[in-house]
Amino acid sequence: MGQEQVSNANRFSPFISFSRKEWRQLRASTPLLLQEEDLARLHGINERVSLDEVEDVYLPLSRLLNLYVGATQNLYEATHEFLGHTGTKVPYIIGIAGSVAVGKSTTARIIQALLSRWPNHPKVDLVTTDGFLFPNAELERRGIMHRKGFPESYDTRRLIQFLADVKSGKPIVEAPVYSHLAYDIVSSEKIVVRQPDIVILEGLNVLQTTVGHVPRRMNIFVSDFFDFSIYVDAPERLIRQWYITRFFTLRQTAFRNPESYFHRYASLTDAEAEATASRIWEDINAKNLRENILPTKPRAQLILHKGEGHRVQEVQLRKI
């Protein structure tokens, strides 16, 4: 490809790309209000985010999001002033997508912690789409238990209704709870959302507009309710490595609980554990990533590209 073609490709890209160094400089004077002990509570399994990572990547991101939230709040106020009435408080909704084991849950928790420390939006709720999976009994009835985590395994209508209620300013909205120990919905528990300033919705398929390769019959998608969206990205070889490492850790911890759905894996040898994790990765998670999750990456407004050790190497921001 000639130099002119390369230049044109960059010029017409929908994203502005930043190296880690370039992105870090956009932090400006944003203060770091998290301590090491705070991070210890936010880490995922086998993922240790350093304060340097927070300073270089997440503080600039929190500054950007704070500016966006403030602008949106001002826009709502201007609209209500024009209409001559006091409007209902409407939360700002951030969607975070990405593969299993890529670290999107840790990313969501760090963003929640940072955004809640800004004075103009102190109440930040985090909801995961795991709670909107169909119960195991329903997945079994439909014959798709082996496709748990794929788009068709979610009660998308219920998720959309939840987001519609939140976005309309409904005083109290409930979301179902998922237990990773039981590997199922906990029917007796609910997450209650009470008009927060910001809602972060984290999940595999939050940027989906299709079920598999078949267009939805409904005209409303989960992402229609997002004010901002983030995709956490990494090379598949690294995500696979992180998934297997996490499986080994769970084998020594959560899987040992007799009440764990995966208790049968606790007694596996190292060789058996690696073979089992690799098989699950290839048959389920890699397939879901390639067919459903990765194709949604270009729809995000911001992409965090990770390298070794979960360190973000590059940030892409969609052009305004």
Image: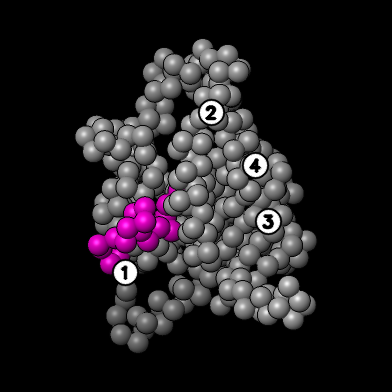
Question: What secondary structure is found at the residue carrying circle 4?
Answer: helix
Front residue (pair 221, 164): 221
With 289 as the anchor, is 316 left or right in this view? right
Quarter residue 79 falls in: bottom left
As shown in the figure, which amino acid type bears the numbered disc 3?
Val
According to the image, label 3 marks what residue?
Answer: 57
- Circle 3 or circle 1, nearest the eye: 3
Disc on the earlier residue, 3 or 2 = 3
Q: Where is residue 3 in the image (x, y as percent from the top left)?
A: 77, 77
Q: Name the residue under label 2.
A: 277
Q: Which residue is drawn at 59% across and 31% down?
A: 244
Q: Earlier in the sequence, mark 4 or mark 2?
A: 4
- How far apart, in angstroms, are the residues tagged by discs 4 and 2? 14 Å
Image location (x, y in percent) of residue 109: 54, 47
User: Which range is magenta?
Assistant: 204-220
Q: In this view, does 185 lie above or below 117?
A: above
Tag 4: amino acid = Leu
User: Marks 4 and 2: CB-CB under 8 Å?
Assistant: no
Instruction: Kindly check if marks 3 and 1 are in contact, taking CB atoms under 8 A apart as contact.
Output: no
| Helix, strand or loop at mark 1 | loop
Is 182 part of what is drawn in magenta? no
Mark with earlier residue (1, 2): 1
Give the side of residue 112 with respect to residue 161, left or right: right
